[in-house]
Amino acid sequence: MLGALRGLISGLLLGVAQFHSMSSTSTTTDVAIFAAGCFWGVEHIFLKHYPPQQNKGILKTAVGYTGGKENATDPSYRQVCSGATDHAEALRIEFDPNVVSYDELVEFFYRTHDPTTVNRQGADVGTQYRSAIFYTTPDQLEAAKRVTAEVQEKHFTPKGQKIATEIVQAGQWWDAEDYHQLYLFKNPTGYQCPTHRLHW
């Protein structure tokens, strides 16, 4: 009886180990980086529609700063808000491309803000609030251009509007201060830019 129990426990432990091993090797992770105004709302709307616990493709997010001057290293929120560093408030998404495509994330990015305004989302004005796609590979660059052209043709040309989103190569990334991470989940009544909603 004791021997059978030991065998059962050993089998369970082996199964758990194999599961973790398979999980760590079978999940492919890519990174997408978007700027679309105040990063609180950008992170909130992506996670609302792609919650990691529902296996919709987004695995992890972080808000932070990118696209700034090379000599402006490890900027603070205050420095970024001053406009002196040229950084954008941005969202870094780790995602599984086997579950959600980069094209789909780019299209969703366009759905959730106003990409026709330069350095502005709603009442938030400044270079830190610009609309930008920071691509990490040549494939992402091609996808970003393709989806942008499709979205322009379908949703903005009929209204006489032009997408002003920058598509630029990703550079150095800096995580924002801890209190900014998942801000609107921790503070549900906190400020949210009114442009961060589904526009179609």
Image (spheres, helix red, strand yellow):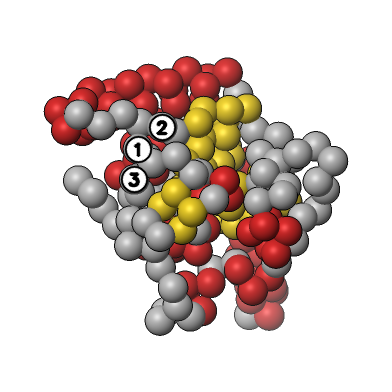
Q: Residues within 10 Å of mark 1 (few under 14, many from 20)?
A: some
Q: Could you say where residue 97 lies in the image, as x and y percent from the top left? A: 47, 36
To which residue does mark 2 refer? 164
Amino acid type, callout 3:
Asp
Q: Could you say where residue 51 lies in the image, as x and y percent from the top left? A: 41, 60
Residue 108 sits above or below residue 77 on the image: above
Q: Residues within 10 Å of mark 3 (few under 14, many from 20)?
A: many
The foreground one among 61 and 144 is 144
The foreground one among 161 and 2 is 161
Q: Are marks 2 and 1 in contact (CB under 8 Å)?
A: yes
Amino acid type, callout 1:
Thr
Residue 94 sits above or below residue 146 on the image: below
Q: Secondary structure at mark 3?
A: loop
Amino acid type, callout 2:
Ala
To which residue does mark 3 refer? 114
Residue 83 visible in image: yes
To which residue does mark 1 refer? 116
Q: Could you say where residue 118 lies in the image, as x and y percent from the top left? A: 44, 39
The foreground one among 41 and 47 is 41
Snapshot quadrant of residue 62:
bottom right
Alpha carbon of mark 1 to alpha carbon of mark 3: how far?
A: 6 Å
The foreground one among 162 and 43 is 162
Q: Secondary structure at mark 2?
A: loop
Q: Are marks 1 and 3 in contact (CB under 8 Å)?
A: yes
Q: Residues within 10 Å of mark 2 (few under 14, many from 20)?
A: some
Q: Residue at x 23, y 49 (%)?
A: 199
Q: Residue at x 73, y 58 (%)?
A: 79
Among the two numbered marks 2 and 3 on one chain, the one whose residue lies closer to the N terminus:
3
* Image-based side of 17 in relation to 107, left or right: right
